[in-house]
């Protein structure tokens, strides 16, 4: 597992954006997300195949990925309000701390 992904057409004049992409593609989190996505698509495809009388690869994969997208969007709809609330609270606290420090430094 020591393989490192290389980003093609990397230009050092782009202010480090290529390095950020390298870090993203080499991150463990991205690999975990890809594995979970693959497992979910296999599970969805297995459920479709088990319920069908005949086997058609195109229909099976199409249905599996439609189910995967529907499941992911429903999970996102459940998680997004919570994440935005936490993010908003943390940003508000950070701005509050900066504001308080600015006010007390002038006093």
Image (tube, rainbow, N blue to C red):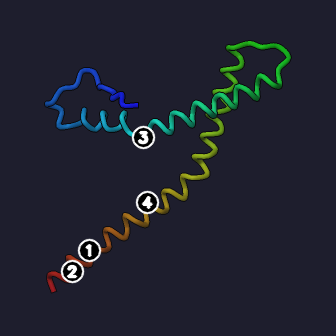
Q: Horizontal and vertical percent for residue 22?
A: 30, 33
Mark 3 → mark 1, Cα distance in angstroms: 37 Å
Name the side, left or right, on which 69 lies relative to 12: right
Q: Residue at x 61, y 46 (%)?
A: 75
Q: Which residue is mark 3?
A: 28
Give the image location of residue 44, x and y in percent. 70, 30
Element at label 3 = helix
**Residue 103: which disc?**
2
- Camera-side residue: 4 or 65? 4
Q: Nearer the viewer, mark 3 or mark 2?
A: 3
Mark 2–mark 1 CB contact (< 8 Å): yes
Q: Residue furthest front?
A: 2
Q: Of tags 4 and 1, which is closer to the observer? A: 4
Query: Which sits earlier in the primary sequence, circle 3 or circle 1?
Result: 3
Give the label, 3 or 1, closer to the camera: 3
In the shown orientation, is residue 74 left or right of residue 54?
Answer: left
């Amino acid at each position: 597992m020591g393989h490192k992904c290389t980003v093609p057409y990397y230009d050092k004049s782009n202010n480090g954006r290529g390095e950020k992409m390298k870090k993203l593609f080499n991150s463990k989190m991205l690999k975990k997300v890809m594995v979970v996505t693959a497992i979910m698509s296999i599970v969805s495809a297995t459920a479709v195949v088990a319920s069908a009388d005949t086997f058609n690869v195109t229909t099976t994969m199409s249905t599996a990925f439609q189910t995967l997208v529907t499941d992911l969007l429903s999970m996102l709809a459940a998680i997004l309000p919570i994440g935005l609330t936490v993010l908003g609270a943390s940003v508000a606290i950070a701005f509050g701390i900066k504001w308080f420090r600015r006010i007390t430094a002038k006093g």
